[in-house]
Image: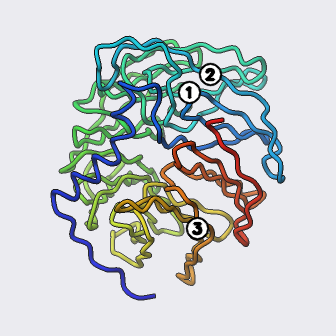
Amino acid sequence: MSPPKKREPGIGRKLLIFLCLSSVLLIVACTRAPTTGWSGPTMNDGVLYVGSIEGKVIALSNVTGTSPVLKWEKEFESKTSGGLFACGASLSTPMSTYGIPAIGGAPGEEKLYVGGYDGKVYAIRLDDRTMSDYDTGSAIVGSPIVASGMVFVGNSDGEFYCLDLQLGKRWVFETGGKIWSTARVHDGTVYIGSADHKLYAIDIESGVERWHFEAKGAILSDPLVANGTVYVGACDDYFYAIDAATGSEKWSFKANNWFWTKALFYHDEIWVGSLDHNLYVLDANTGVKKWVFETEGMVQSPPVLVGDKIIVASGADKGDQRGKLYKIDPVARIAGELKSFEAPVLAPLYADTVNGIIFVHAQNGTHTLYAIKVDDGTQLWQRDTSD
């Protein structure tokens, strides 16, 4: 494989990239629902759950076969006036979801937690589909997570919420910028990035800040916690390794464009994609670059591990809306195309490691969910999630 081409995007190109990535959020305040989005799927007890641009959560069974079955769907009907980018009008319309649904609760009482662009956190009981909600007051872009019997989620007013499983508020932590990322919880601490350039470490019981780390650009990617280190990328072209206990920088690595997505930790290596089209492999302890794989588009979806192979997706670039799925042998450093799509892949992938299947939610205006076999790229099925 030839060495990756060096990309040196200027301020104008970076601004264009940011506007393209943000446009799917900007149009929501003045229209019925966004035409694109990046809700990733999740699976529990053989049922696949995914959010749609039509303001629904869809539950599919028989997803490891060739004919998935619609088990149920739930629509979010919300009345809102503005939200993140106010238009001064009151809307009563289905509002879309961008994050991955999260599942939590005691056996027999499990709920699906979904963050809506209308600013509400929804809890749907899996047994009878009854639904409750909590209004944070501003658009939710990241995914809610369930950990230690609590639900954590941030909104576009820079507020980070800790709720109980019944959606009662426990505490709120205020940052100085929009929160578009998803938090990570580890050892009694929750880590969250903000557009105010800071990564915060917060005590999960009290909501009190333990420390913060400041980058030179917005932190819109999800943090990864491994081996006492928090790994996170920022919109200053740098990827950082931060001491999880103290918040001090261990090392940093500079790419040729922003980091928009979460990294993967594998065999003491960090695998992380950038908007410069590259998937970087870094030494987890030193940050030294060990390998680079150049895709054909911006990498906005986190790489995932299936068996002994790493799968990564690419998005669109310069008007080319095609996305691709790549399969990589992390030991031999051999990569090849697994599947091509007529639409960019922005959403996180879901890896069914038991059956060797990757579920891909591609952003083609209507949105299509695909089930792909990892061994040979065979497509088991596809389904329009906006129907």
Query: In the drawing, does residue 322 fall left or right of residue 176?
Result: right
Marks 2 and 3 sit apart, C-alpha to C-alpha, by 34 Å
Name the residue at 58% across, 25% down: 149
How far from the left and from the top, in percent, is residue 383? 70, 46
Q: Looking at the picture, does residue 210 appear above or below residue 233?
A: above
Instruction: Identify the residue at the far bottom of this view.
Output: 2
Which circle, 2 or 3, is nearer the viewer? 2
Marks 2 and 1 sit apart, C-alpha to C-alpha, by 6 Å
Determine which residue is flagged by label 3: 310
Q: Are marks 2 and 1 in contact (CB under 8 Å)?
A: yes
Q: Looking at the picture, does residue 120 appear above or below residue 231?
A: above
Name the residue at 33% across, 74% down: 288
Q: Are marks 1 and 3 in contact (CB under 8 Å)?
A: no
Q: Earlier in the sequence, mark 2 or mark 3?
A: 2
How far from the left and from the top, in percent, is residue 206? 39, 22
Nearer to us in this view, 294 or 212: 294
Looking at the image, what colour scheme do you see? Answer: rainbow
User: Which amino acid, by three-letter code, is at mark 2?
Assistant: Glu
**Helix, strand or loop for disc 2:** strand
Determine which residue is flagged by label 1: 55
Determine which residue is flagged by label 2: 75
**Helix, strand or loop for disc 3:** strand
